[in-house]
Image (spheres, rainbow, N blue to C red):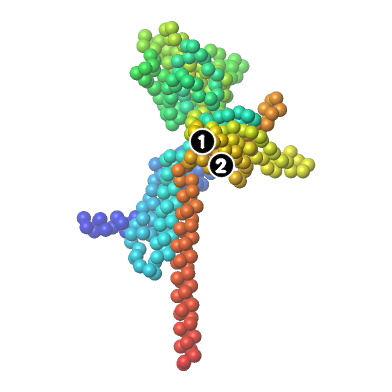
Amino acid sequence: MKTLLSAVPRFLGSFGLAVALLLILLLLTWFGTLDQVHNGLYDVQKRYFESLYVKQHIGPVPIVLPGGMVVMGLFALNLLFGGMIRIRWNKRNAGVLIAHFGMAFLMIAGAVKQLSSEDGLMKLRPKQVNGVFESSVRYEVVIWDATDDVRMGGSVRSPVTEYRIDPDDVRAASGSHQRKFTSQVLPFELVLERYLANSRVVPAAGIGVPQNPVIDGWTAQYVKPPKVDSVSIPAVYATVLTPDGGRKQGILWGMERVPWTFELGDRTWAVTLRRELYDLPFALRLDEFRKEFHPGVGMARAFESDITRLKREEPDRQVLVEMNRPLREDGYVVYQAQYGTDPDGVDYTVLQIVRNPSDQWPKYACYVIGVGLLLAFGQRLLNYLGQERRRREREATA
């Protein structure tokens, strides 16, 4: 037992394990790159790099590889045992130890971002104020009592009570899988199925044999995902199961202009598929948007936004947000991402907003790694110069 316990740290800290993990990571990157031909970047990232294992076919032969989460976890253990525990802690290895601590800090920063970050977009027209941004790729199903007000779709929250189905549960309702949503305050159950990562909803007449069920003359068709994941428009089939055994069916689509509604008793309920919304602890107002074009072409050379940050009990703050100059506020980073023009000819700005608690950690980790490498190579340089000096002294006295 003692031999086994000592063998485990040796294995976890071995160079052989590090090489094997690098090879597996190479395979995951290769398979993921090939898979992007058929699926979007977000789905590929989830399958290969944010999973515990990956089932991959090489021709007719299936193979199972550890997913990116497992590989990076083993990398962290390899760094801990091989570069920080088993190494001798002395002045000679001080630079190497500092560099390894910097690498560990960098991996921790990545883990924090993976587990707790939010990323999305906000569209602002001149003089418009908004305190909510929407996810680029994550869609949630939202249910609310619309008896008094059937809302239009959009990214502005309503004061009514909303019941949400998490985007991960929505995506899991693909293929033959179903997801059932129940709540003590809702008088029905909602079943989601046949999730399509990218789709269009079209009239069933005239398209031959539909890929999916036809509801009220409409059906959802799968469309090959585009290269840019934020352009993908998902769809999912929804079935309402009422207490009396009744069934109501509808198609939820990410581009729908109005929610799917149905009557139950004397109430009207609405269900929609929309991008996941995040609240900001402050609001933003677009004061002015400017863009410059390259001479003779229609390509933008630079674009920027004059933004006012609005926050309760604090004075307003005017900020210039441009492509390489973001706004940092309360743990959020606001970047100038895109722009566009509305049908009425008014330019609008699109801001990318990221909440990442470890936003600055990679920079500090690189500082630590740099100090460690300078110390390690500096020590070796000084040792080499000392050896050369002593060699010349021996030759001079010989």
- Between 164 and 61, which is closer to the camera in this rendering? 164
Residue at 42% over, 63% down: 96
Q: Amino acid at mark 1?
A: Glu
Residue position for label 1: 314
Give left or right: position of 396 versus 97. Answer: right
Query: From the image, which quarter does the N terminus lie in?
Result: bottom left
Crowdedness of circle 2 by 10 Å Cα count: few (<14), some, many (20+)? Answer: some
Residue at 58% over, 29% down: 129
At numbered mark 1, what does the secondary structure look like: helix, strand or loop?
Answer: strand
Crowdedness of circle 1 by 10 Å Cα count: few (<14), some, many (20+)? Answer: few
At numbered mark 2, what does the secondary structure look like: helix, strand or loop?
Answer: strand
Residue at 46% over, 59% down: 369
User: Hey, which residue is sitting farthest left in the picture?
Assistant: 1
Q: In the image, which is nearer the foreground, mark 2 or mark 1?
A: 1
Residue position for label 2: 327
Is residue 23 shown to the viewer in this render? Answer: no
Give left or right: position of 154 versus 113. Answer: right
Q: Earlier in the sequence, mark 2 or mark 1?
A: 1
User: Hey, which residue is sitting farthest right in the picture?
Assistant: 296
In contact (CB < 8 Å): disc 2 and disc 1: no
Q: Position of residue 228 (x, y in %)?
A: 58, 36
- Between 4 and 361, which is closer to the camera in this rendering? 361
Compared with residue 264, is residue 251 higher up or lower down, i.e. above or below?
below
Is residue 257 shown to the viewer in this render? Answer: yes
